[in-house]
Image (cartoon, rainbow, N blue to C red):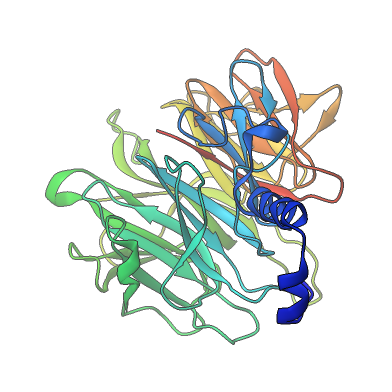
Amino acid sequence: MMHRASPRKRLALLPALAMMFLVAASLMLTGCDLLGNLFGGMGQRASVFAIDSKNGNIYEIDTMTMTAAAVPLVSTMQNATGDMIIRGARAFIAVGSWANDKPGLYWVDLSAPAPAARRIGEGISAQYVWITAAGKGFVTSADYAGVYANAVYTFDPQHPGSGLGEAVSGFAEYFFPQDVVSAGTGSEARVFIADNGNGKVYRLNALGTAVEASFSTTAGGTTGLLPGSYDSDGDGIAEPGVFVANSGGWDAAWNPLPGSIDFIPCSHTDGMPAIAVEPGFSASRLAAFDAQHLIAVSYGVTSIINLSLPQGDPARITTVTYEGHSFGASDVNVRDGIAYVPDGATAVYAFGLNGEVHRIPVGTTGAMITNVAIRE
């Protein structure tokens, strides 16, 4: 990206040109108030962020005006930048291995005067990241090329400089991990891992060091997880657990297969199958407005599922559209009753249960806005 200059040529640069170079470099890495960042280029007040996977840029979104910053707050400068989670003033960002040179788990101090993205430990093909209520971090790594291990690693969010911990043990052969979340409360809280390669979800032990149970999903393409509660046995009591988004995968001839939305109660014992919440429905990521309304996204489609209505009811699933067109990508997040969905190109769509949809342009031509993150 940068051409190397000889020492003599560098010394011969005029002070004004040197200053221009430093300012330009600063803008590339951190964003700057001079070019119109919404919150002074500090990320201290923004509550929603959009991620440009192609360029690694992270943009602030003003939820009052439904507009995005003109320049990124910070950038990993890596293709395949994706899932991002925020805890306090720190953001943690997964960067997969695809057409880049420094994949891995990154972190950013959003409160810094000039935020910068730093990699945590060695390179991995990072996919999804999660931090438990107890403050323990988990990141999944999956790589079709086989350069990096398919594994789940722990890390310390309070001390990111300490690198990645040991890989979690006990996964099945052909393990291809995706989303990671925790569900349950107190001593019953557990971490769950989605396995796209085998159509399974794993539950880790209390220490988060090894698999203690696995559950088969009702469809392939197991990708997204959402902690929540659902009356899966029909006794009128909603149980804590995880919803599972299954995209469906493909058959031997690469024809798409139907997916499903499942639920796995925390009380499930090893080997019990997942329970179908919405069979035959493909989704890659989930969020929720409330206990009765799920938001499911896949490429080009975003839907609201009303769990209070029975399966098969035509009103149970509503496709969200903007000016008559559907939209969706691989991520969704909700804050203050508003869902934010990227379109995989240069926009994020914001909408509530009332059906009003706002289109928020983000990034520049050629960007790929694939993920959104919220400050809780």
Q: Quadrant of residue 153?
A: bottom left
Residue 281 falls left or right of residue 364: left
Residue at image location 57% in from the left, 47% down from the top? 285
Classify 337 as above or below 300: above
Residue at image location 45% in from the left, 78% down from the top? 122
Q: Nearer the viewer, residue 226 or 59?
A: 59
Rendered location of residue 98, percent (x, y): 69, 73
Residue that extends furthest to the left in the rendered view of this protein? 187
Rendered location of residue 371, percent (x, y): 62, 47
Residue at image location 67% in from the left, 21% down from the top? 66
Residue 117 falls left or right of residue 159: right
The quadrant in which the C terminus is found is: top left
Q: Quadrant of residue 339?
A: top right
Q: Quadrant of residue 251?
A: bottom right
Report whether residue 4 is seen. Answer: no
Rendered location of residue 341, percent (x, y): 65, 36
Report whether residue 211 is seen. Answer: yes
